[in-house]
Amino acid sequence: MSSKVKNTIIIVIILIGIVLGGGFYNFVYQKGKISEKQKKIKDLKLYQLDTEALNQQLVFLKKRVAELDSVLANRKYNIPYNFSQAGFFDFVNQVSFNFSPYSYVNIEFNEIEPSTNYNIYHYSLSGTAEFNDLVKLVYAIEESKQLKKISDLDLTNNVKVEPDGTPHYLVNFKFKTNVYYSSDDRFYVKDFHENPIIPNPAYDFFIPLIRNEIPPNKDKLLDVQSAHLLALIPDGAFLADASGNTYLLWEGDQVYLGYLTNINYQNNEVNFVLNKGGIIENISLQLEKEKKQSK
């Protein structure tokens, strides 16, 4: 084979290689790049809006957000977004801020329970409180806008008597509280307003109907059981106690353990109603001269 033929064959092989390489580059490698660039251009064109169109879209979205937020805000309860673990401690401290000096609350964090759409903080609350303070605490937790629920409530009565004899009827309590929160802001309320969480006063059914503890006479009121009637005046009565202290009282005035209910001018007597530890007594006092005449 002559050198001319060999050179021709080599050149043909080189040309075929160039053609194959160029075809691979154009139809394989560049095709992917071109498709990627075309997709990017298409995506950019979707958002190629003028300023006026963008402003109109913004106004519409703001209105839609406000509508959705108002729907959530009008619900009685909401599940808060990313509620902190310490948030419940702050909530209880705010509720119990004005409690009686004899009321206190202990809070213990137990665990976090994960769920599909929300998570739950578990707390244990215990302590001693006056009945209406406990009612305020339970009502505030149950009626709070941010969803909280009480379970396993245990109550026992407790009587605390001060050195001067003043009794305080308290309640020992222990219960669990579940505090719900979400990692998804779809439940989130932008303008949060707490529900009314102050209850009406409730009857304290932990106070015994008959009590051994009689409160002392700290206000120095008239002790009717050792008093006597001195005189009657229009709409009033003069009385004195065993120590010689005098009192001018009208109907409805308070005395030790009760009230002056009636002044009977016809019979020259005054009538009282007393509550002696749950036992109600009606007591009448007459003028000294009436007592002598009746004898």
Image (tube, grey):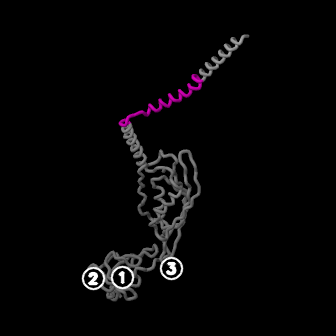
Q: Kindly indicate the quadrant of the structure image that contains residue 126.
A: bottom right
- Mark 1 vs mark 2, foreground winner is 2
Q: Earlier in the sequence, mark 2 or mark 3?
A: 3
The kind of secondary structure the magenta stretch mainly shows is: helix
The residue lying at 34 percent from left, 83 percent from top is 247
Secondary element at image label 1:
strand
Residue bearing the label numbered 2: 233
Marker disc for residue 163: 3
Secondary element type, mark 2? strand
Residue drawn at (36%, 82%) of the image: 285
* Start-end of magenta stretch: 25-53
Task: Inspect this view and state whether residue 104 appears.
Answer: yes
Q: CA distance from mark 2 to mark 3?
A: 40 Å
Q: How far from the left and from the top, in percent, is residue 44?
A: 46, 32
Q: Amino acid at mark 2?
A: Ile
In the picture provided, is 71 more to the left or to the right than 293? right
Mark 3 in CB contact with mark 1 (< 8 angstroms): no
Q: Toward the viewer: 240 or 138? A: 138
Which amino acid type corresponds to the residue marked 3 in the rendered image? Pro
Residue 280 percent across, percent down from the top left: 42, 74
